[in-house]
Image (cartoon, rainbow, N blue to C red):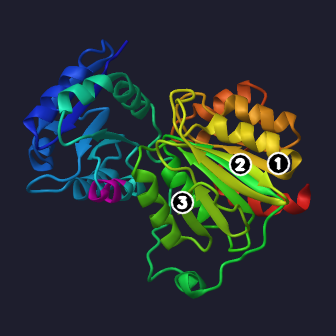
Amino acid sequence: MRKISVFVIDDSAVVRQVLTHVLEQDPGIEVVGTAMDPIAAQQKMARRWPDVIVLDIEMPRMDGLTFLKQVMSERPTPVVICSTLTERGAQVTVDALALGAVSIVTKPRIGLRDFLRASANEFLREVKAAATARVGAVTVPNRSKQSRPQHARTKATAPRLTKTTDRVVAIGTSTGGTRALEAILCELPIDSPGIVVVQHMPERFTAAFARRLDQLCECEVKEAVDGDRVQAGRVLIAPGGRHMQLRLSGARYHVRVSDGPPVNRHRPSVDVLFRSVAAVAGQNALGIIMTGMGNDGALGLRAMRDAGAATIGQDEATCVVYGMPKAALEAGAVEQVLPLAALADEIMRWPNAH
């Protein structure tokens, strides 16, 4: 069986050394080269192009975002971003995911060796998932503040809708999900049903991700805090490192954000959200499971379907990684299989069709 070839680009010699050591512990992975910046990397990769690139963002001579744009336009290749756990690192990494990077590996500023060794298994899983990713599966139109419709640009000054929805849409996704969510949410009008989302993402990164989407979408998009109302025109994204559940108070939905052990190796977990939606909303819910590695969300979506909810799985052709939707389909959780491009329309059609 052919090994997965990986190239590591990072300006820290220690990071390059530690990442190479971790990667080469796996017999199915081969590190074919390392470089301290993209310019040096290009010369080496020209001789043997890798299956996966592990890329730092802030480097001398050429930054990671510039290099990523170049790779995605000239020779699309799965890229795993190696990012620092800082506010700046989070924002730039979200930009990298929007450009087509597959996933994130975080690195602290101190204690690097111990941290990476403790996270070795997760890092290896991300690299292996990246090797199977369909990098061109999701095409997101270039949206800027200048190119958005006028009503979207002035969203911040428009009154928020305060009507509580009696319907709720729950979405779960992982690898490849940031671009897929952008593709869906940017198509929704401001009167869309209330939406709750779990996107597997490290702590601190979900806030930057929500801010980016809020600037692009007509709906309000925010990182959830405990007690937030679920209402029409609002999208709540579970914060990295914490679980999110749906709760009912009187006739109003809100979310509970809490600590707790990882479920299916994840916190937030899609299963945790979906099970709560099944218990609280039942047939008044729509569950959507999208691109991602592993099986998180499969049993939760089955619980939703058993409770009378409508359920959708993203189709294989438009998934970056067809892991989570496949597991849900095999669990009997998926009522309908749809391509990414059809999901926004289905979200708006659903309340009137059920």
Q: Nearer the viewer, mark 2 or mark 3?
A: 2
Instruction: Judge whether 253 appears above or below 240 on screen.
Output: below
Instruction: Judge whether 98 appears above or below 271 on screen.
Output: below
| Sequence-first tag of 2 and 3 | 3
Give the CA separation, mark 2 to mark 1: 8 Å
Q: Helix or strand or loop: what does disc 2 sit on?
A: strand
| Sequence-first tag of 3 and 1 | 3
User: Picture coordinates of residue 352 (x, y %)?
Assistant: 89, 63
- In this picture, residue 301 sits left or right of residue 85: right
Q: Residue at x 38, y 56 (%)?
A: 94
Q: Helix or strand or loop: what does disc 1 sit on?
A: loop
Residue 225 position by quadrant: bottom right
Amino acid at circle 1: Ala
User: Picture coordinates of residue 36 (x, y %)?
Assistant: 9, 42
Q: Nearer the viewer, mark 3 or mark 1?
A: 1
Magenta segment range?
Answer: 87-93
- The numbered mark at residue 182 is 3
**Residue 336 visible in rendering:** no
- The numbered mark at residue 229 is none
Give the CA separation, mark 3 to mark 1: 25 Å
Quick one: 225 or 328, which is closer to the camera? Answer: 225
For the residues bearing labels 2 and 1, Cβ distance under 8 angstroms: yes
Residue 195 position by quadrant: bottom right
**Residue 248 visible in rendering:** yes
- The numbered mark at residue 246 is 2
Label 3 CA crowd tier, 10 Å (few <14, some 14–19, many 20+): some
- In this picture, residue 237 sits left or right of residue 274: left
Q: Is residue 342 magenta?
A: no
Quick one: 229 or 48, which is closer to the camera? Answer: 229
Give the CA separation, mark 2 to mark 3: 22 Å
Q: Which residue is mark 1?
A: 281
